[in-house]
Image (cartoon, rainbow, N blue to C red):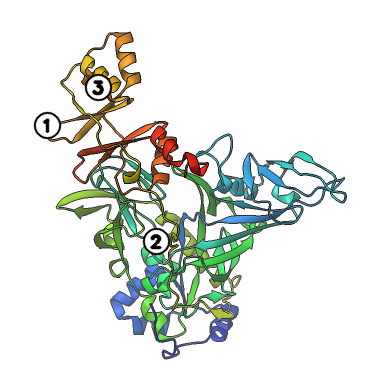
Amino acid sequence: MSGDRGAETLRSYEEINEKIRRGDVVVLTADDYARLADERGWREASREVDVVTTGTFGAMCSSGAFLNFGHTEPPMKMHRCWLNDVPAYKGLAAVDAYIGATAMSETRPFEYGGGHVIEDLVAGREVELRAEAYGTDCYPRRYLETSITIYDLNQAILVNPRNAYQRYNAATNSTDRILYTYMGTLLPYYGNVTFSGSGVLSPLYKDLYLETIGIGTRIFLGGGIGYIIGEGTQHNPSIGMSTLMVRGDLRKMNPRYLRGASFYRYGTTLYVGVGIAIPLINENVAKTAALRDEDIYTDILDYGVPSRSRPSVRRVSYAELKSGRIVINDRSVKVSPLSSMKMAMEIASILKKWIEEGIFYLSRPIELLPNDTVFKPLEVRRREPRVSEVMRRDIPTIKADEDLRSAAKLLVDHGIDHLPVVDGYGRLVGIVTSWDIARALAYGRMKLEDIMTKRVITATDYEPIHSVVAKMERYNISGLPVVDSDNRVIGLITADDISRKFATRGAVP
């Protein structure tokens, strides 16, 4: 996505900062400016308004902090370290570390992670530091346990490689099972839609062509003042998905705007508050700053499709998303935000107040962010084995109204431990294992439909083996029925099948 960076000039940074110094600058939050532009037209509105403030507050997984602990006596070259049992990256100098928001506690995984550690530090709470080393002549200490606060650190710098996407795809789920994703919990059969981003307040939508945002831009970050230090990773302005790389001093931030969070059965993250003041320097910026929720669109993607090219269910505006319900396949579906609109509005209002009070000046970027880069996916050049190469195809099935004796005989005759249960059309309705039958006999349950597992984890024949292994580990199971697009059973894959196939390679992929 590109625009004319030579559009007609309206005012300069110097003129705006002089107005801030004099106390007569005109600042509106992005939603107020959009309303004014809607009433009077963006040209007239831009003659009255100097600056538009934005805000967003959402999960920004690519977040983290560089920490310097200082040297102990005797000194130590930390090889590994943990903060509240969360591993920090130690491929740095002796007492420098990087704690990532998505790193998870080794004792409380999925509940507590790097994002929570960062929040605890900013809040002034004590954090347990544990470190190990192999010991050298100049760094003889080998082990350390202590507690620290942010005030004990020499540096605590928030450095986020990717923040504040220009827009986010919304998410839904067409499958028959619940999905646990970075877009939250997605219910089966298009049961809900989730979305992120702040729409009309979105920083990178108010300067759509990146004419005021670049290296050195001063921003609101985590309740303090931070800076943009470059484009974020996966920066893709060609499809309206620009991102930011930012930094700021954690010791000057506020835990209200940096909050650790957990996505159920997915992992941990950090909610980050980001706000950018957009100077209306030219007509391009003035026009895009006037975009309303009704003008900002994104796609609802089906996360039930395990592919980077997930299909779009429909295109939708942020006005529709924020309404709380949208229509999919003629059915009204509940929509819920993963970002906080209230906090986004609060951030934009605080930034407006800072400018009006003369404590926040605008900085001209040293270099604008690129607006012509294209994000490249990672191509897997080594061949990945698929389920179709490993699965057993000649497996028996059974119907739910058959007896346990028939099920037990099929398991014994075919030398298997997993027996798919199907309906009259061969569609999967459950699964029974040898353990299920043993338990049924022990407790006197004689009906197959009473002991079978009805919520079955399945595989497809084109699925990569590593995906099946991950499912087995996640759900603590040893076999999966393989089904086609109509949920008909076409095979079975087990942990033993995978082990036999890859025994010569020394490891399961």
Q: Position of residue 210 (x, y in %)?
A: 46, 77
226 to the left or right of 144: left
Disc 3 residue type (three-letter): Leu
Mark 2 residue element: loop
- The CA span between labels 2 and 3 is 56 Å
The answer to which of marks 2 and 1 sits earlier in the sequence is: 2
Within 10 angstroms of label 2, few (less than 14), some, or many (20 or more) residues? many
Please provide percent x and percent y for residue 434: 33, 20
Q: Nearer the viewer, mark 2 or mark 1?
A: 1
Instruction: Specify the label residue 198 is tagged with.
Output: 2
Q: Quadrant of the N terminus?
A: bottom left
| Between 407 and 236, the one nearer to me in the picture | 407
Q: Give amino acid for label 2.
A: Ser
Q: Residue at x 68, y 51 (%)?
A: 90
Q: Position of residue 254 (x, y in %)?
A: 59, 54
Q: Secondary structure at mark 3?
A: helix
Indicate the position of residue 325 as horizontal and vertical percent values: 24, 52
Q: Secondary structure at mark 1?
A: loop
Asked whether residue 294 is in view, the answer is: yes
Amino acid type at mark 1? Gly
Q: Which residue is mark 3?
A: 410
In the image, residue 99 sits, relative to residue 372, either above or below, namely above
Task: Return the residue at label 1.
Answer: 424
Out of 143 and 256, give the one closest to the viewer: 143
Q: Establish if 473 lies above or below 99.
A: above
Q: Is residue 68 left or right of residue 261?
A: right
Q: State which mark lies toward you, 3 or 1.
A: 3
Separation of disc 3 and disc 1 at Cα?
Answer: 18 Å
Residues 159 and 506: in front is 506
Between the C-alphas of marks 2 and 1, the distance is 49 Å
At a point 28% along the width and 52% down the height, the residue shown is: 324
Q: Upstream in the sequence, badge 2 or badge 3?
A: 2
